[in-house]
């Protein structure tokens, strides 16, 4: 029989979440009651039980104390929290993987789920110019594995608003940019994503502070994620998520229509392609 040591981190989290639910029900406590003792929402507890949210070390200690589980959660959560993604983004990536709807705004880069391997490599090399090749290869592979979410024909539904700066900033080379923009156009033509471009002439807009990611789930409250350099905040706080949804609606209102956006993306891709084939390029 396959033992716990053979489980990947995601499977471990599901197993530990089931143990958390059993321990909570034995207590007996509702999700809301346990959440109050942990100073989190009942929905947060539900996400830990479903395995979609990691049980962090300090939370594991509190769970063992409250539920009298003899150190079970402290012992098992370290391996369960292992992730291929940066620490500040790990929880968001795990939530993204089970979301049924994703709404994204990116200000400077093509969104990670929509990148090509060549574009992702150029981004990672810019972040880590002295990293060994095998490190960069691993980062690119992880990003492409994450992008396989879009292999499913309909889920998750992805709606992205991308700033025009992400189209105009040459990442890697003209050929790399032509490739990633044609990839975006192909996804739109396949009706796999809805894509809008926020043009430069929109001026000031509702998310000048940076990227925004909104996620909806079948059996859990919606969440939002905001990110800065090496920092990220994932939340299901209703007031915060509602405010972020308003921000996203304002961005969509300022953006070009999907049809206009596709025309701009294909036009810029053509410019890059001509640049790549120009004499001396």
Image (tube, rainbow, N blue to C red):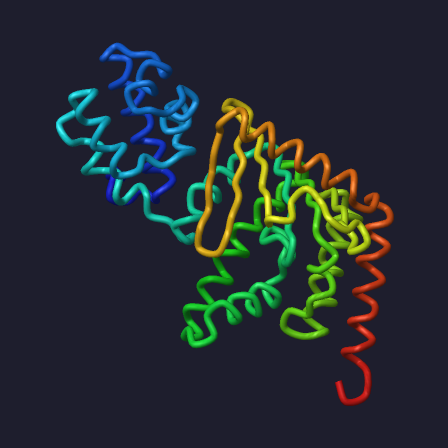
Can you tell which quarter of the image residue 14 is in?
top left
- Residue at (29%, 31%) from the top-left corner? 16
Going by the picture, which residue comes out furthest to the bottom?
280
Image quarter of the N terminus: top left
Q: Is residue 181 above or below residue 98?
A: below
Q: Is residue 246 above or below residue 182?
A: above
Q: Relative to residue 51, is residue 257 drawn left or right?
A: right
Q: Is residue 212 above or below residue 63?
A: below
- Residue at (74%, 46%) from the top-left corner? 195
Q: Is residue 256 above or below residue 220?
A: below
Q: Nearer the viewer, residue 177 or 22?
A: 177
Image quarter of the C terminus: bottom right
- Residue at (81%, 88%) from the top-left corner? 279
Going by the picture, which residue comes out furthest to the top?
28
Percent of width and height locating residue 264:
83, 57
Q: Relative to residue 52, is residue 221 drawn left or right?
A: right
- Residue at (43%, 76%) from the top-left corner? 130
Going by the picture, which residue comes out furthest to the front?
204
Q: Nearer the viewer, residue 227 or 16?
A: 227
Percent of width and height locating residue 118:
61, 68
**How many numbered marks, from 0 up?**
0
Percent of width and height locating residue 250:
73, 37
Q: Relative to residue 244, is residue 71 drawn left or right?
A: left
């Amino acid at each position: 029989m396959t033992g716990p040591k053979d489980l990947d981190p995601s499977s471990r989290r599901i197993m530990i979440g089931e143990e958390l639910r059993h321990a909570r029900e034995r207590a007996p406590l509702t999700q809301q009651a346990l959440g109050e003792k942990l100073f989190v929402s009942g929905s947060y507890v539900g996400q830990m039980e479903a395995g979609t949210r990691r049980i962090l070390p300090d939370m594991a200690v509190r769970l063992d104390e409250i539920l009298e589980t003899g150190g079970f959660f402290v012992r098992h959560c370290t391996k369960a929290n292992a992730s291929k993604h940066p620490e500040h983004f790990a929880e968001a990536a795990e939530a993204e993987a089970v979301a049924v709807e994703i709404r994204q705004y990116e200000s400077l880069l093509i969104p990670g789920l929509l990148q090509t391997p060549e574009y992702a490599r150029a981004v990672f090399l810019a972040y880590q110019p002295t990293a060994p090749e095998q490190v960069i290869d691993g980062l690119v592979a992880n990003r492409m594995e994450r992008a396989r979410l879009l292999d499913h024909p309909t889920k998750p539904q992805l709606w992205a608003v991308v700033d025009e700066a992400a189209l105009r900033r040459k990442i890697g080379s003209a050929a790399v940019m032509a490739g990633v923009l044609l990839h975006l156009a192909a996804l739109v033509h396949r009706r796999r994503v809805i894509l809008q471009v926020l043009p430069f002439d929109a001026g000031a807009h509702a998310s000048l502070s940076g990227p925004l990611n909104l996620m909806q789930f079948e059996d859990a409250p919606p969440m939002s994620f905001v990110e800065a350099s090496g920092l990220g905040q994932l939340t299901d706080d209703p007031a915060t998520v509602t405010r972020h949804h308003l921000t996203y609606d304002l961005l969509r209102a300022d953006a070009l229509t999907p049809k206009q956006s596709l025309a701009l993306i294909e036009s810029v891709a053509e410019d890059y392609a001509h640049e790549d084939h120009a004499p001396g390029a």
